[in-house]
């Protein structure tokens, strides 16, 4: 029988709803029915009307899981997973399910607004789109003339339409484009680029042994990794988790080690020490042949014994040795999970390098159960001309401040410094789409200070975020369920190299408009109309040009799969590193004065009355996207997690209102005690304590990480470092 | 053939992501603060060191074969559909006495704050009629929930129940015979409360019902006696009786 | 034989009696059909099933029960408002009890009606039965029962009716249901005797007829309601 039911076809819908209607009307006389009081009538009658089903891709985080939106009378009533969408394995998480409250959020922006009072004062006037676009274009031209085109900073978000904002920024003529990712995973990307030449995807599904450090995939959903861990476990995969917190990932691991925060590198260097010393690596296929600098590494690693690591990170030497032996026995179907948000320490890139090198020793790249090379998806980025502006400066504003900035991303934190200092050149404008740095970037006071140096801020978003609250012009964006979006190529694991697109599920609400339309209209006003003289359909055609059947598959199934090669993509050809092999010893680092191999540095440790503040999120919120009625029910405000022992010492009790203060600022929230946290560490979740009353559910609820975290950055990639902040805690009377 | 819908839950893969709860909430437009399903968990014992764990356990109405909620309902507004095994609430027949809410040892029912009738999981009957899986099953990321017809030997649930040891979470003093099967090592299992019918219901079954029967019985007996006497005495003598009487 | 008739009931009283009777019977039958629970079913599961089949569904049955009850209560209310005096008199009459006479009447009459006069004698009692007023003790008792039961049934019924509309606490509803059932049950027990007396019993036939005609034979009044009869004559 059908244990897996197929997605509903329209005809079947019609049949069943007709049948239901027939049954309900025949059940009893309508006359009698009409006598029944309203409350009784409100009961079990089947809803009238017919469902329509639309394929779409989720945008509640960045995974873009396949969805089917069930629509009735032009209202989205339910969102179901698209079972044909293998990347998300036919699932939708809590956030995706809550997308109905994302689109029908009473806090949504309805029409363009222009600030009339001081920034943050909350005085707005409603203006027409015409006026909003004219005014924005005028301001952008003015800034371009006064400070060169690079005087505008662009933050295009991580949305399927972000490519249009990116394109708009480039044709406008600014190099200063940065992103949410500079608060997220750039240090990891840097580490893998500098070790194997690209950023790999973990092949969790076929793995036999995984070490998860600095990641919490069971709470921070990554499709399909999060799901595949359980399939892998059914096939005997062992999961080791290192985390100062007892996360849900830790709760379900085979072994959980409460590592001291910031000491992961000690563990991995010791792991390498054992692997190298006991020659547990694959001598034929891997070392020293297919690596660069193995001999230097051999010498370098001598100092990092398991006993030394035990003292540093708190994990026993025996465990380290045992794990080294176990993981190499499982290799190459074994890995150190690369993770995502690696914006934690000043040496994050080097910490992740230590993990990447461990992976190199496991020889798992481009192999089943290891790390996957990029597959061919085949979705193209249509070509466009970037005009030349003579007066533009030579490079982006924060160029050269760190040795490993990533192209087109840069570092928001370093740009913020440059804007405040005005060096090497001024930036006076900010074009922002769907990014909320006021809530996500460390040191909110500094972001406010940066804004004091900006003459014009325009923000496209769906609601009045904290960042929008401090903007000059706020443009209501259309939600992902209302837009026609270009094709997006996705990767993730062995089962998918796929492409998805979005068509509007329901029409745009209020006066909201898509970023594409906004960029198009602004481009016209800036004399750059030619760069946006196309429709989304034409753009899509160019994107999938040469991919036979792609468009049909996306329209019929909601997804297209490219049956491209999964494993052995390199098959003898050189990697994209300088040496063409895995660089345990990085030559470019050596040249630019960076440690070519990871050198352990103990992070600044909290003093007796201090704590290290770590931040993270739950499975039901994406960063600062907390203003959702369905999701705040699980967490109405964030709390500060602390171990009961220091709490006792400080005279603090569960439920106390405490003030967490750092050099950057202070926040107030309730205390929650748990033994599941390292004793000198405290934790709070992101996305609360919003300043903007437009985020009505989280406005003044709990504390914002942005107000407490001090601003540090990774010294190689410029990625933000959010776990370096040491805080003191006192009870609020 | 009659269906016996059930759910088999592999709680060892539940990661407490709440997707099932939100999916259900959206599907049935549930009010804030109320749920038709849940995820329970054990408390971690940190003395276990690196082996410290938490076991998450999804749940919902167990669609019992011995449904105490149905037993507690005076009007049959809550009933077990013989064709599917699903326990439904006929909201139109319900007078909102709340007996069933209290009688469920699993807390699977709540009184809807505006409709003021009980609300509970019905395995998404509307979705089943449309050929869709229940909302929680459909959306579950790790596929901890499996749904199907236990009477169909080919179904996935039948296979799971056949091939695995399963646990039914039950309680005292009534074995509810739940139709939610947990694969082997599920935890926690001691959370259901005892089956306790509300006082008003116990008074009705234990006191009022017998009392009424006795009262009606006695009165019936009296009437029968009078009737018999009337039959066996002639009208004349009765007339005479009357005359003498006063 | 004396064929003179004496006025006993006016048209309004006759109407409200029969209206009341019909509603009671209908409400008892439908109400019994609403109890569908194997632990309670007073007459067995066949009755609720039958009633639900007749009415199409339980919901319709409930609807009929609720609205009949409400109409019944409303009509009664109007009747009471229009005929305040008669109502007060009626209440005074039925609640005025002479404990010695009424108790004696109850005991003796019951024995006489079931076991016969001989039994009275055997038990060492005299065969004379205490004289009665407009209503005899049995009628008074039944009238008291219907008045109290009616009031309680209306109150509990309304509580149940409004529970899904405004009540946030279900406990009063649960108790209402129990009490509603109790009162209906007791009233039904009394109703059995009342119906027997009126419709089957030979000696009360004139009273039954008077519920249509409004008059009773003088003889009957004299014998059965002596005090009332005397009062009339003295007036």
Image (cartoon, coloured by chain):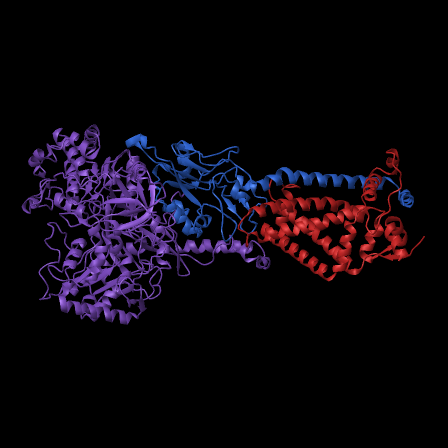
Chain colours: A purple, B blue, C red
Q: Residue furthest left?
A: A591
Task: Name the spot of residue A630 as percent of width and height, x first.
Answer: 38, 51
Q: Quadrant of the N terminus of chain A?
A: top left
A607 lies left or right of A107: left
Task: Name the spot of residue B117 as percent of width and height, x first.
Answer: 52, 49
The one nearer the camera, C95 or C11, is C95
Quick check: A504 above or below C173? below
The one nearer the camera, C56 or A650, is A650
Q: Residue furthest right?
A: C1
Quick check: C157 above or below C110? below
Picture quarter containing residue A168?
Answer: bottom left
Task: Tell me what residue is drawn at x 70 percent, y 57 percent.
Answer: C76
Quick check: A215 above or below C72? above
The number of numbered discs placed on residues in the rendered structure image is 0
Task: Name the spot of residue A122 as percent of width and height, x first.
Answer: 31, 63
Q: Is residue A542 something one can see in this rendering? A: no
Picture quarter containing residue A671?
Answer: top left
Q: Is residue A656 something one can see in this rendering? A: yes
The one nearer the camera, A659 or A442, is A659
Picture quarter containing residue A257?
Answer: top left
Q: Residue furthest front?
A: A733
B140 lies left or right of A263: right
A507 lies left or right of A600: right
B78 lies left or right of B49: right
Task: Name the spot of residue A519 as percent of width and height, x first.
Answer: 23, 65
Task: Tell me what residue is drawn at x 23 percent, y 67 percent.
Answer: A520
């Amino acid at each position: 029988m059908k244990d897996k039911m197929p997605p509903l076809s329209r005809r079947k819908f019609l049949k069943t709803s007709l049948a239901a209607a027939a049954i309900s009307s025949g059940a009893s006389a309508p006359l009698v029915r009409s006598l029944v009081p309203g409350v009784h009538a409100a009961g079990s009658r089947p809803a009238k009307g017919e469902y329509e089903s639309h394929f779409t891709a989720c945008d509640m985080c960045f995974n873009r899981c396949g969805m089917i939106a069930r629509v009735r009378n032009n209202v989205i009533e339910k969102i179901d997973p698209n079972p044909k969408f293998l990347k998300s394995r036919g699932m939708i998480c809590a956030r995706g399910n809550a997308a109905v409250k994302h689109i029908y959020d009473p806090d949504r922006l309805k029409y363009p607004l222009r600030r009339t009072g001081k920034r943050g004062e909350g005085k707005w006037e409603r203006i027409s789109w015409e006026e909003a676009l004219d005014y924005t274009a005028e301001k952008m031209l003015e800034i371009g003339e006064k400070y060169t085109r690079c005087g505008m900073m662009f933050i295009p978000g991580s949305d399927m339409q972000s490519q249009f904002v990116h394109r708009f920024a480039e044709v406008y003529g600014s190099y200063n484009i940065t992103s949410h990712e500079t608060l997220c995973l750039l240090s990891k990307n840097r580490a893998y680029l500098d070790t194997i030449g690209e950023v790999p995807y973990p092949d969790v599904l076929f793995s036999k042994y995984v070490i998860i450090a600095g990641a919490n995939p069971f709470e921070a959903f990554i499709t399909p990794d999060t799901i595949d861990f359980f399939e892998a476990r059914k096939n005997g995969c062992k999961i080791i988790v290192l985390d100062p917190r007892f996360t849900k990932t830790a709760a379900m691991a085979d072994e959980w080690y409460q590592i001291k925060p910031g000491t992961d590198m000690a563990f991995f260097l010791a792991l390498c020490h054992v692997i190298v010393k006991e020659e547990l690596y694959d001598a034929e296929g891997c070392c020293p042949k297919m690596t660069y600098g193995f001999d230097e590494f051999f010498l370098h690693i001598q100092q990092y014994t398991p006993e030394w690591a035990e003292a540093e990170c708190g994990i026993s030497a025996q465990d380290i040795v045992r794990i080294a032996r176990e993981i190499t026995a499982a290799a190459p179907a074994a890995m150190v999970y690369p993770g995502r948000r690696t914006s934690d320490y000043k040496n994050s890139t080097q910490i992740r390098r230590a993990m990447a090198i461990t992976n190199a020793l496991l020889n798992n790249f481009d192999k089943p159960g290891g790390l996957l090379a990029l597959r061919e998806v085949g979705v193209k980025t249509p070509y466009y001309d970037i005009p030349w502006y003579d007066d533009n400066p030579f490079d982006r504003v924060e160029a050269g401040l760190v040795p490993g900035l990533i192209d087109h991303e840069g570092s928001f934190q370093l740009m913020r410094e440059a804007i405040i200092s005005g060096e090497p050149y001024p930036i006076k404008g900010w074009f922002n789409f769907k990014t909320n740095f006021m809530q996500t970037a460390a040191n909110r006071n500094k972001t406010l200070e940066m804004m004091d140096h900006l003459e014009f801020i325009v923000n496209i978003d769906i609601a009045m975020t904290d960042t929008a609250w401090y903007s000059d012009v706020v443009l209501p964006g259309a939600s992902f369920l209302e837009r026609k979006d270009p094709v997006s190529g996705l990767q993730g694991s062995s089962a998918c190299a796929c492409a998805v697109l979005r068509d509007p599920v329901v029409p745009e609400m209020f006066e909201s408009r898509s970023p594409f339309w906004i960029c198009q209209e602004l481009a016209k006003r800036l004399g750059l109309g030619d760069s946006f003289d196309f429709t989304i359909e034409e753009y899509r055609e160019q994107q999938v040009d040469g991919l036979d059947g792609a468009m049909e598959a996306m329209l019929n199934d909601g997804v297209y799969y490219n049956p491209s090669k999964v494993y052995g993509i390199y098959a003898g050809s050189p990697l994209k590193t300088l040496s063409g092999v895995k660089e345990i010893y990085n030559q470019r680092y050596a040249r630019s004065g960076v440690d070519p191999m990871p050198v352990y540095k103990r992070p600044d440790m909290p003093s007796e009355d201090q704590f290290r503040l770590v931040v993270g999120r739950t499975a039901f919120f994406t960063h600062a996207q907390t203003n959702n009625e369905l999701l705040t029910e699980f967490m109405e405000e964030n709390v500060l997690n602390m171990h009961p022992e220091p709490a006792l010492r400080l005279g603090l009790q569960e439920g106390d209102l405490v003030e967490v203060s750092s050099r950057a600022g202070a926040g107030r929230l309730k205390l929650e005690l748990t033994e599941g946290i390292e004793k000198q560490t405290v934790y709070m979740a992101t996305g609360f304590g919003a300043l903007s009353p437009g985020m009505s559910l989280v406005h003044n609820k709990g504390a914002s990480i942005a107000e407490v975290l001090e601003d540090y950055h990774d010294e190689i990639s410029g990625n933000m470092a959010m776990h370096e902040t040491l805080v003191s805690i006192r009870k609020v009377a | 053939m009659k269906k016996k819908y059930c759910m088999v839950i592999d709680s060892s893969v539940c990661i407490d992501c709440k997707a099932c709860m939100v999916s259900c909430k959206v599907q049935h437009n549930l009010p804030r603060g109320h749920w038709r399903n849940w995820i329970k968990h054990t408390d971690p014992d940190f003395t276990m060191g690196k082996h410290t764990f938490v076991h998450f356990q999804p749940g919902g109405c167990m669609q019992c074969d011995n449904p105490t909620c149905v037993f507690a309902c005076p009007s049959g507004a809550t009933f077990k559909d013989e064709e599917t095994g699903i326990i439904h609430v006929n909201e139109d027949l319900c007078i909102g006495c709340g007996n069933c809410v209290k009688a469920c040892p699993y807390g699977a029912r709540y009184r809807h704050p505006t409709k003021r009738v009980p609300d509970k999981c019905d395995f998404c009957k509307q979705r089943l009629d449309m050929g869709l899986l229940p909302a929680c099953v459909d959306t579950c990321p790790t596929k901890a929930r499996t749904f199907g017809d236990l009477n169909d030997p080919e179904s996935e649930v039948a296979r799971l129940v056949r091939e695995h040891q399963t646990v039914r979470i039950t309680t005292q003093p009534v074995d509810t015979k739940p139709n939610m099967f947990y694969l082997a090592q599920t935890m926690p299992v001691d959370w259901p409360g005892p089956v306790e019918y509300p006082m008003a219901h116990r008074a009705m079954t234990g006191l009022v019902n017998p009392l009424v029967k006795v009262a009606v019985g006695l009165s019936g007996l009296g009437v029968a006696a009078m009737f018999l006497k009337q039959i066996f005495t002639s009208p004349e003598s009765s007339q005479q009786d009357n005359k003498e009487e006063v | 034989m004396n064929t003179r008739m004496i006025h006993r009931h006016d048209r309004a009283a006759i109407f409200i009696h029969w209206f009341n009777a019909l509603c009671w019977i209908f409400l008892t039958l439908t109400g019994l059909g609403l109890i569908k629970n194997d632990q309670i079913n007073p007459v067995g599961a066949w009755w609720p099933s039958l009633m639900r089949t007749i009415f199409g569904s339980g919901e319709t049955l409930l609807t009929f029960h609720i609205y009949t009850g409400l109409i019944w209560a409303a009509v009664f209310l109007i009747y009471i408002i229009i005929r305040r005096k008669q109502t007060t008199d009626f209440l005074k009459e039925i609640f005025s009890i002479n404990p010695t006479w009424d108790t004696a009447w109850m005991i003796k009459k019951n024995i006489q009606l079931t076991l016969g006069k001989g039994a009275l004698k055997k038990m060492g009692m005299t065969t004379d039965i205490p004289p009665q007023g407009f209503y005899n003790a049995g009628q008074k008792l039944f009238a008291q029962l219907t008045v109290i039961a009616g009031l309680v049934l209306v109150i509990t019924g309304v509580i149940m009716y409004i529970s899904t509309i405004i009540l946030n606490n279900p406990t009063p509803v649960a108790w209402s249901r129990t009490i509603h059932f109790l009162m209906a049950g007791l009233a039904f027990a009394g109703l059995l005797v009342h119906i027997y007396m009126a419709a089957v019993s030979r000696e009360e036939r004139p009273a039954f007829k008077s519920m249509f005609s409004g008059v009773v034979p003088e003889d009957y009044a004299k014998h059965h309601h002596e005090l009332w009869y005397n009062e009339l004559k003295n007036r």
